[in-house]
Amino acid sequence: MHGIEADGLVVRVGGRRSGRNAVNGLSLRLGRGVHGLLGPNGAGKTTLIRTLATVQEPSAGTLSLLGVPAGGKLRPVRRRLGYLPQNFNFYKRFKVREFVEYLAWLKEMPAARIPGAVDKALERVGLTDRAEDRMKSLSGGMVRRAGIAQAIVNDPELLLLDEPTVGLDPAQRLRFRELVVELGQQACVLISTHLVEDVAAACADVVLVSEGSLVFQGTPADLATAGTTDHVGDSPIERGYSALISGGAGGAW
């Protein structure tokens, strides 16, 4: 069973007159493992992640998550999801443990499981020693790690992460890569990022979108072979990215 199955997916954003298709006829199948979602600003990455997280409804096409059609009952699917938005809010007076516990409760986890699951999630992101600190006292990188903790607290079968490494230092990014590789052994993990090196290091599969359409899907090695020395980039995978984007509708700069 695929974690994500989309056929001709269209997601429209904005008003009736001024709206546009942020996701435009996209077809995609993703199973267990770690998948990287790349694309320039405005490519539709965040809209796609929000739609896969059941925050936004598709406008057309079909979408199935963990074998369940997106138009069906969503609560059972949401219990099996983990989602880190690009920007998320929290009660600033919450302690870190309380924040993760609250999200576990929203995911309808059994009460008896929550304390142990929270401890495990905080340990995985290196926040055990900050569990009793207020969220408002954390640095930006620590807040991001708390966000990752809430996303994985329920051991999701489908994990959706939007720019998860923003604010993390190099050592923390390395630990994050190790964590998602571990999680990808049992789950379908999709990471939306603008950091090509994170994709090269952690992902076995790359999805490249431009203007809401699928431009490329394959391994990081396949992406690297798409570029030449004529294209911008410090590494082969960056040059491949540049070649495919500049060859499509998205442009490059």
Image (cartoon, helix red, strand yellow):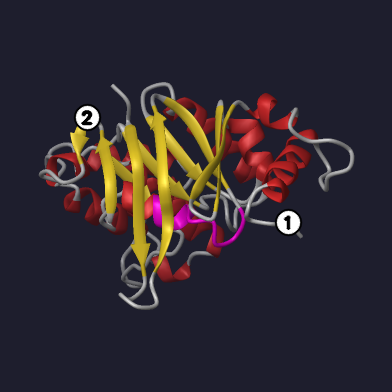
Looking at the rendered structure, the kind of residue marked 1 is Ala
**Which element type, helix, strand or loop, lies under badge 1?**
loop
Q: Nearer the viewer, residue 155 or 23?
A: 23
Left or right placement of residue 62 versus residue 128 in this view: left
Q: Is residue 147 visible?
A: no
| Disc 2 target residue | 67
Q: Nearer the viewer, residue 78 or 224?
A: 224
How many C-alpha atoms fall within 10 Å of the one at disc 2: few (<14), some, or many (≥20)? few
Quarter placement of the C terminus: bottom right
- At x 67% / y 48%, what residue is drawn? 245
- Asked if residue 14 is among those painted magenta in the image, a careful observer would answer no
Q: Residue furthest right?
A: 229
Q: CA distance from mark 2 to mark 1?
A: 37 Å
Which residues make up the magenta segment? Answer: 40-48
Left or right placement of residue 239 versus residue 97 in this view: right
**Residue 125 image point, x, y percent:** 47, 43
How many C-alpha atoms fall within 10 Å of the one at disc 1: few (<14), some, or many (≥20)? some
Q: Is residue 39 above or below residue 41?
A: above
- At x 40% / y 47%, what residue is drawn? 25
Quarter placement of the N terminus: top left
**Residue 249 image point, x, y percent:** 63, 54
Left or right placement of residue 87 versus residue 50 in this view: right
Q: Is residue 159 above or below residue 44?
A: above
**Residue 95 image point, x, y percent:** 33, 62
**Which element type, helix, strand or loop, lies under badge 2?**
loop
| Disc 1 target residue | 252
Q: Nearer the viewer, residue 27 or 39?
A: 27
- At x 65% / y 29%, what residue is drawn? 220
Q: Is residue 201 visible?
A: yes
